[in-house]
Image (cartoon, rainbow, N blue to C red):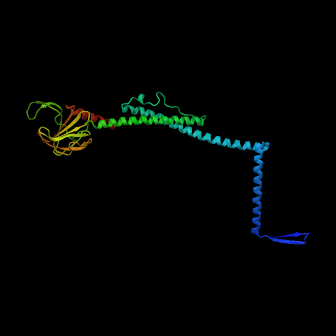
């Protein structure tokens, strides 16, 4: 493209040669300048009109602001409704947790009334349609406090149940010899050596030599020695003045001071000491007084049956 510029006064002319690229650059530059000037004028006129309250400008500003506020409120309302719904679900689960805690507390031997976080209250579900942000925050704060209280309650219950479990593990309710029939029971009988009536202070479990002897409960070995009457003997202290005695063993696998657990193999059946044949003589002593071991073993069988239900 060629432009010719003529000066009539000087009788001169000048030609300008514009290529396609130059023409596009000129057009783009003019467009940018026009857009910049328009934006500056629009911004200046709009701000000035908004400050001075020009009718048309003020109406446009109110429409824009009102639309933005409506959108913001609608967004907040939708989010509050969703949060309120989730809060209601959490409160319902918290009520279920409270009910569960009351039932479990009975197993732990705790009075539910003593651990209830809010006596006589179970919480109210929140309806989210008219709920404000402040009310939602207050409800969340209350729920957090209740959650902490439930956590403390469950911790107490867990501690109590663990304590009971430990106590059960320390009571001799496990059969010391498996899969054998009971021989002589606890009580008065005719002594096989003297032929006279005598008190049999434990239970006899006839078994082959080498049959494993298991600890009836966890505890500490307080005696492991050879006794003229009991032969190779083991005594285990279970606390609370409760001791179990295992006699006539052929081999012993623990020593005094050992900490043992329920069901652990501590010896093997034999016929050492005052014995007429291979068997385990098993005793339970409370404060040094022999008790009928069958009562403890029956209690263990009852607990096992309850656990299978």
Report x, y in % for residue 165: 32, 37
The image quadrant where one finds the C terminus is: top left
Q: Is residue 172 left or right of residue 184?
A: right
Residue 210 against residue 164 in the figure, above or below: below
Quarter of the image where one finds residue 23: bottom right
Of residues 169 and 96, the one nearer the viewer is: 169
Q: In the orientation shown, which residue stands out farthest toward the left?
A: 194
Residue 309 visible in the shown view: no
For the point 62% across and 41% down, the residue is 76
Report x, y in % for residue 146: 48, 34
Quarter of the image where one finds residue 161: top left
Q: Is residue 171 left or right of residue 252?
A: right
Residue 42 against residue 281 in the figure, above or below: below
Report x, y in % for residue 222: 21, 39
Q: Is residue 40 left or right of residue 116?
A: right
Residue 266 visible in the shown view: yes
The image quadrant where one finds the N terminus is: bottom right
Q: In the orientation shown, which residue stands out farthest toward the front?
A: 10
Report x, y in % for residue 285: 21, 33
For the point 22% across and 33% down, the residue is 294
């Amino acid at each position: 493209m060629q432009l010719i510029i003529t000066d009539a006064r000087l009788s001169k002319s000048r030609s300008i040669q514009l290529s396609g690229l130059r023409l596009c650059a000129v057009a783009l530059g003019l467009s940018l300048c026009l857009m910049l000037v328009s934006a500056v004028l629009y911004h200046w006129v709009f701000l000035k009109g908004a400050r001075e309250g020009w009718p048309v400008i003020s109406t446009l500003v109110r429409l824009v602001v009102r639309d933005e506020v409506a959108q913001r409120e609608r967004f907040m309302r939708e989010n509050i409704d969703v949060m309120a719904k989730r809060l209601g679900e959490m409160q319902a689960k918290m009520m279920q947790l409270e009910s569960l805690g009351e039932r479990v507390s009975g197993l732990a031997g705790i009075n539910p009334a003593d651990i209830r976080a809010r006596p006589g209250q179970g919480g109210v579900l929140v309806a989210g349609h008219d709920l404000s942000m402040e009310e939602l925050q207050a409800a969340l704060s209350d729920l957090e406090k209740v959650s902490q209280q439930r956590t403390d309650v469950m911790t107490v219950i867990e501690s109590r149940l663990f304590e009971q479990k430990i106590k059960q593990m320390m009571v001799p309710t496990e059969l010391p010899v498996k899969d054998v029939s009971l021989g002589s029971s606890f009580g008065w009988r005719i002594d096989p050596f003297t032929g006279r009536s005598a008190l049999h202070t434990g239970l006899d479990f006839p078994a082959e030599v080498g049959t494993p002897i298991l600890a009836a409960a966890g505890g500490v070995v307080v005696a492991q020695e050879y006794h003229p009457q009991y032969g190779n003997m083991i005594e285990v202290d279970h606390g609370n003045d409760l001791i179990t005695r295992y006699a006539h063993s052929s081999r012993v696998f623990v020593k005094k001071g050992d900490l043992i657990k329920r069901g652990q193999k501590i010896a093997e059946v034999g016929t050492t000491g005052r014995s007429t044949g291979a068997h385990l003589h098993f005793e339970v002593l409370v404060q040094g007084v022999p008790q009928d071991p069958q009562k403890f073993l029956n209690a263990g069988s009852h607990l096992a049956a309850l656990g299978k239900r």
